[in-house]
Image (cartoon, rainbow, N blue to C red):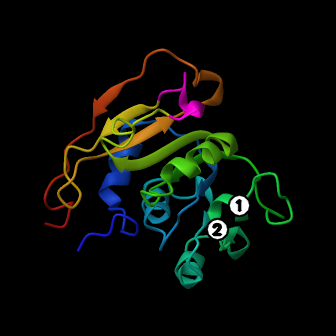
Amino acid sequence: MFDFEIWNTPDWAVRRLLEEVWLPPGAWIEPFAGNGDIIRAVCEDRPGQIQFTAVELRPGCHDNLATMVKSKNIHCPREFLTGFSPHDHRQLEGVASYFDVAITNPPATKALEALPKCLCMAEYVAILQPHTWLGRLKKQPEFLHGIPPDIYVLPDGICGMTYAWFVWGPKNERFKDEYITRELQATSLKERGL
């Protein structure tokens, strides 16, 4: 059964985003890192260009993340929203407190809670969610007024659903009246492992 809270992000979904959207090299954060699927895909696509900080609530993921990220850049707080703050330098000793990019595929129930924090701590933000994610909200969150994301739709379904990357940034260009919706390149069955 497909779990909307915890599932692996396909490498090809990350590659499609990186082919279409320019995201700067430098300090990146993956706030719901899991086993590092997004980190692995980015580092394969851009070797040596990104220094990742990984945050994951499940301590059991630490060892797997340690193979990709320096151990001082891995945080396993009890709760992302209160346990990892860009303003709390005690937890961020030796790593960036603000980031060039926040890229993540958060659990469905945490996405809207994590988004304002990501928007605050990163110049660019890319979140993978179902294509209808923001459209199905009864009321648009106040913090999103005037800063619509650009939407990059993955034409190839993930577990039978259409997903999209919602992208914000850079900060000085976030306030805008219009946004783009673009369909990303299709992915071959071979690349998708089918």
Magenta span: predominant SS is loop
Tell me: 90 left or right of 97. Answer: right
Q: Which range of residues does the magenta coloring cover?
A: 141-148
Residue occupying the far front of the picture: 138
Relative image position of residue 151 (x, y in whole percent): 37, 34
| Nearer to us in this view, 29 or 142 | 142
Q: In the rendered structure, which amino acid carries the disc numbered 1?
A: Thr
Tell me: 127 left or right of 89. Answer: left
Do tag 2 and tag 1 residues touch (Cβ < 8 Å)?
Answer: yes
| Nearer to us in this view, 77 or 104 | 77
Question: In the structure shown, which secondary structural element does the residue marked by tag 1 occupy?
Answer: helix
Residue drawn 37% across the image and 49% down it? 129
Mark 1 Cα shell of 10 Å, populated few (<14), some (14-19), many (≥20): few
Residue identified by numbered label 1: 82
Relative image position of residue 71 (x, y in whole percent): 69, 76
> As displayed, is residue 10 above or below residue 174?
below
> As displayed, is residue 32 above or below residue 155?
below
Question: In the structure shown, which secondary structural element does the residue marked by tag 2 occupy?
Answer: loop
Mark number displayed over residue 79: 2
Q: Residue 84: within the magenta?
A: no
